[in-house]
Structure formats: C-alpha cells, structure tokens
Amino acid sequence: MATRVGAHRLREMSFKRSNCAIACALDVIGDKWTLLIVRDLFLGRSRYGEFLDSGEGIPTNILARRLRRLEAAGLVERKVDPRPRSRYAYRLTRSGRRLGPVLDALIEWASSQIPGTRVAPGVR
C-alpha cells in the first residue's frame, strides 16, 4: 500500500477513464511523446531546449503540454534554473524514477522484436 505523494496525485487526477491499471497508466504516459521525455530525463536532460534537441522532433506546444502533465501527475518537478538562457530545469520525482523498469522492458522488447533498433547510450 503506497502513500507516496506522486501516487496520491495520480489517484486524484481527473483523466482516469477506468479502474484498469493498464488504462490508467496509458492515460498518464501512453501518448507517443511522454516516455521519450522521461527517457531524456533519465539521460540527464533537464532543460526545455535539451528536450527539443533530442532528435525525435517534438513540437514545442506538445512538449510544453506534456511537461505540465507530467508535473501535474507528480512524475516530474520543475525548478527555476539559475543557468543563463533557461527558465526552468525539470527532473524526475521518486514516482517518475519508478518508470525506469518500464523503459527497460520496452527497450528489451523492441531490441528483440524490431530489427534495426538501438539503445540510446546511458538509458540502461
């Protein structure tokens, strides 16, 4: 039984369409961009521009929405970034870091089932 703040936030979010665990997870991280942002956070990226430069070509409006959604869900926290030319730095919360095994499972599956895939250095 978890009483973590992130899990509490996720339970109270209004986007839940059913009580199915898979449906609930997909409601939070199931679009084509969110896990790529989480991957980038695991790789040490933390600033908006770094997410834009990651290679998949995420549109700026979608990136902003996904970061806000991840923050609202308690998976990411945003802090004012003291570095020049950056307003905020993002990092995974404890709840967000628990997505590591999910990424590992996706990497394992894709590597074994989809020819020509590669693992980004530092993800595993």
Image: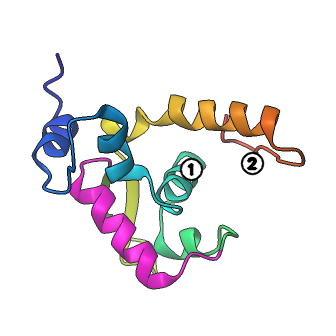
Q: Nearer the viewer, residue 44 or 20?
A: 20
Q: Is residue 86 magenta?
A: no
- Mark linked to residue 39: 1
- With 120 as the anchor, is 46 left or right in this view? left
Number of residues whose C-alpha sits closer than 10 Å to that of mark 1, classed few (under 14), some (14–19) or many (20 or more): many
- Mark linked to residue 120: 2
Q: Which percent across, then down, holds residue 120?
A: 74, 48
Q: Main secondary structure of the magenta part?
A: helix
Q: Residue furthest right?
A: 116
- With 2 as the anchor, is 31 left or right in this view? right
Which amino acid type corresponds to the residue marked 2 in the rendered image? Answer: Ala
Quadrant where the C terminus lies?
Answer: top right
Q: Residue furthest top?
A: 1
- With 21 as the anchor, is 85 left or right in this view? right
Q: Which residues are magenta?
A: 57-75
Q: Which percent across, then down, holds residue 107?
A: 68, 37
Residue at the (48%, 68%) spot, across then down: 47
Which amino acid type corresponds to the residue marked 1 in the rendered image? Answer: Arg
Residue at the (44%, 52%) spot, across then down: 30
Q: Which percent across, then down, holds residue 93?
A: 33, 43
Q: Which percent across, then down, holds residue 110?
A: 73, 40
Q: Nearer the viewer, residue 40 or 19?
A: 19
Residue 78 appears anywhere in the view? no
Residues under numbered marks 2 and 1 in contact, where contact means CB atoms less than 8 Å apart? yes
> Is label 1 in a helix, a strand or a loop?
helix
- With 73 as the anchor, is 11 left or right in this view? left
Q: Is residue 59 magenta?
A: yes
Number of residues whose C-alpha sits closer than 10 Å to that of mark 2, classed few (under 14), some (14–19) or many (20 or more): few
Quadrant where the N terminus lies?
Answer: top left
